[in-house]
Amino acid sequence: MRTVLVIDDEREFRTLLAELLRQNGWQVFEADDGEQGIQSAQLNLPDVVLCDLLMAPCNGFQVCRALRDVEALKGTKIVIASGRDFEADRQEALEAGAHEYLAKPIQLEQLLRLLSHLTATPEPTSPPPAPATSEAPTSVRLKFWGVRGSVPTPGPSTLEYGGNTSCLELRAGRQIVILDAGTGLRLLGRELQTEFGDQALDLTLLLTHTHWDHIQGLPFFLPVYKSQNRVRILGYEGARLGLETVLSSQMENPFFPIGLREVPANVRVEELKQLNFSLGNFQVHACFAYHPGVCVGYRLTAAGRSVAFFPDNEIRQTNRGAETPAAADFARAENQKLTDFLRHVDVLVMDAQYDRQEYSDHIGWGHGCVDEVVALALQAEVKHLVLFHHDPDHDDAKVSQMADHARQLVAAQKSALKVDAAREGMVVELPAVVPAK
Ligand SMILES: [Zn+2]
Ligand SMILES: [Zn+2]
């Protein structure tokens, strides 16, 4: 039997409602106020909590927040019922973790419809499975939503390439994997909203690391504010704090008004333990980047096509900066590993923040020099190189000039390597490769 917990301090209303629900096949628990309600929910694990908004000493918003933090109640749906119909209250309730908001007086028919709708598709207790892979994708599509490094750079001098920070969208069939959550993520969220409307989204967000320019779009990502959506955030743990703590802390008071754990969508943060894993249609390989902190690059393969993403990476120096022969040998071996990791990739998106002149003042900062990135791409026989993580001080003319310089280096080697500078809105379509029979 499906179960509902009714929390309301108006005794008469509560008992009447409970009786009506029982007559309609529900097992009902009742609680007098928010605090009792929280206890009862933890004890009885109901399918639905129907909670009044304005109660003392613990109101409906607080009940929502408290229940969202209880692992055993992850599948429980919360409906806030209020005598007021202010849009601001509705929004705040959804942000606090409610799945629905009802204005009193409540129509029994409407409530029953809502309850069966909410309990029709129970939440899984384990991480959501990746979307079905039965349909072989016909292509892999890559779209750039943020290409800038370090800090967003709006303004007339960056209109061509864009000023948003690191964010890429990768699709294979119906599956959407998002690489990094820089400020470009906000634009992607808006676009997904336009494309899918109220349809439930199942998104995977793969983070390379948690430097600001790679996570700052998350609080402004519309899909996390819709209760029907699932967003799975994957990344590696940093040195001091767990990934979830790091991501939540940028949304804590006083930095942001809504906590990550309070957003209505089913957001799960999972720390990756392996370097090789699969995500639906994609096979994913990770490789540690040469960049401060725990930072990786990914190589994702689907439909016979591969994309590598190294937004923040410096290529190790084997002469400058390598003081001893042993250090130089080590650097060479690491570079060889990276070359092997990138071998024959279709598209390589890589940190090429500095030109040669600038790089000489930034050795050991963890960012790439365009000349060396081109050399690496040639060595690894990459097909298409996309220069990424544009320096915040580089205007459009400078980025274009660096891309031209890279093309000249390629031409001098008589290679077919294609080179572009990443640009917001740029799309790379890779038709599926049919394996030879
Ligand atoms: Zn960065
Ligand atoms: Zn970084």
Image (tube, helix red, strand yellow):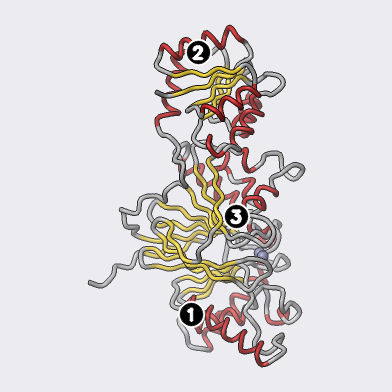
- Residue 401, image quadrant: bottom right
Question: Nearer the observer, disc 2 or disc 1?
Answer: 2
What's the mark number on residue 37? Answer: none
* Point 52% across, 8% down: residue: 16
Q: Position of residue 46 (x, y in %)?
A: 49, 27
Q: Nearer the viewer, residue 340 or 169?
A: 340
Label of residue 340 in the image: 1
Q: Disc number at residue 18?
A: 2
Q: Is residue 415 visible?
A: yes
Give the Cα separation between the discs numbered 3 and 1: 27 Å
Residue that numbered label 3 is attached to:
181
Instruction: Give the amino acid at mark 3.
Output: Ala
- Residue at 43% across / 34% down in the picture? 122
Q: Ligand 1 closer than 8 Å to the CB at disc 3?
A: no
Q: Amino acid at mark 1?
A: Asp
| Numbered disc 2: secondary structure | helix
